Every structure is written in structure tokens, then in C-alpha cells.
Amino acid sequence: MITAAQPARAGFAGNRRRHGWAWIMLAVAIALHVADEATHDFLAVYNPAVRTIRQRVPWLPLPTFEFGEWIAGLAAGVVLLLALSPLVFRGARIMRPISFVLAALMALNALQHAAGSVYMGRLMPGALSSPVLLAAALWLAVTAQRTPR
């Protein structure tokens, strides 16, 4: 016999599944974004900008990077996101707020690349993949919102 709660649970499962796929797609979008930055010499723009900011705001702890440590750290981050995806698919409570934070950070990252390109009058490293990153971040936020608390 079908109870009234069964259709609701089926909807919750569908929401968790969409949230899980949105999480994976954001991880893939981040990987694409990292590849875009790496192939367009992101660190040649980032490191000098950080040095300039440090001169003006010495208390701000912004790091500079060598390519190897930078790419290894970002690759590890993408692997970690993918490793956490089973928790998202299961609907682990902690993953909902983490999804909102991650989505907000990645949306800001994408918008910053776009704004930097407009400001500099040229495509900045990472700008080509920014629309994909922004779309994936927004999708993650929407699916997290629709996932039951």
C-alpha cells in the first residue's frame, strides 16, 4: 500500500540526487577553470598583483605560489570535492551549508574573472571558463536550497 509520505520521500530523493549531480558538476567546472587558468598563465597575473597588494596592505596574508604547489593544491581540492560527493547524494546535513558557501565562493571567483577582464580590457586567465563556473555554482545553490534540511 502506498502512503502519503512515499511521494514526498521520492521527491526528497530526487532533490538529493540533483544536489549531488550539481555538486559533481561544480567540481568538474572547477577542474575546467583550473585548466583554463593554468594554460593561460594565471600565476603571471596573480603573483605580481599579490605583491602589489602586500605593499599597500601589509597585514593582509595573501600567498604567492609556484606552479607545482598551486596546481597540486587545486587538484587536491577537486579530488576532495569529488570524494565528498557521496555525502551530498546521501543528504548529509552538513553538506547543505557547505554547498552554499562553496557556491558563493565560486560565483564570486567567476565574477571576479569577468570583472578583471572588463577592467583590464582583455581576457584574464580563467575568464573563458568563468561562465561555466558561475552556472555550476548557481545550480549548486539552487539544488541545495531545494534539498530538505
Image: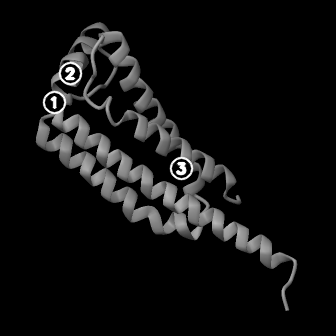
Q: Which residue is mark 3?
A: 99
Q: Which residue is mark 2?
A: 45
Per the rendering, the mark at residue 17 is none
Q: Residues within 10 Å of mark 1 (few under 14, many from 20)?
A: some
Which residue is more in the foreground, 28 or 93? 28
Q: Amino acid at mark 3?
A: Ser
Along the line of sight, the residue nearer the viewer: 99 or 140: 140
- Which residue does the image show at 58% across and 45% down from the upper left? 141
As drawn, the residue found furthest toward the bottom would be 1
Residue 109 locus on image (x, y percent): 41, 31
Q: Is residue 87 above or below residue 78?
A: below
Query: Which element carries disc 2, helix, strand or loop?
Result: helix
Measure the C-alpha gap from mark 3 to mark 1: 29 Å
Q: How many marks?
A: 3
Q: Name the residue that disc number 1 marks.
A: 41
Q: Are marks 3 and 1 in contact (CB under 8 Å)?
A: no
Q: Amino acid at mark 1?
A: Asp
In the rendering, at what x and y percent does residue 74 appear? 27, 46
Q: Nearer the viewer, residue 85 or 118?
A: 118
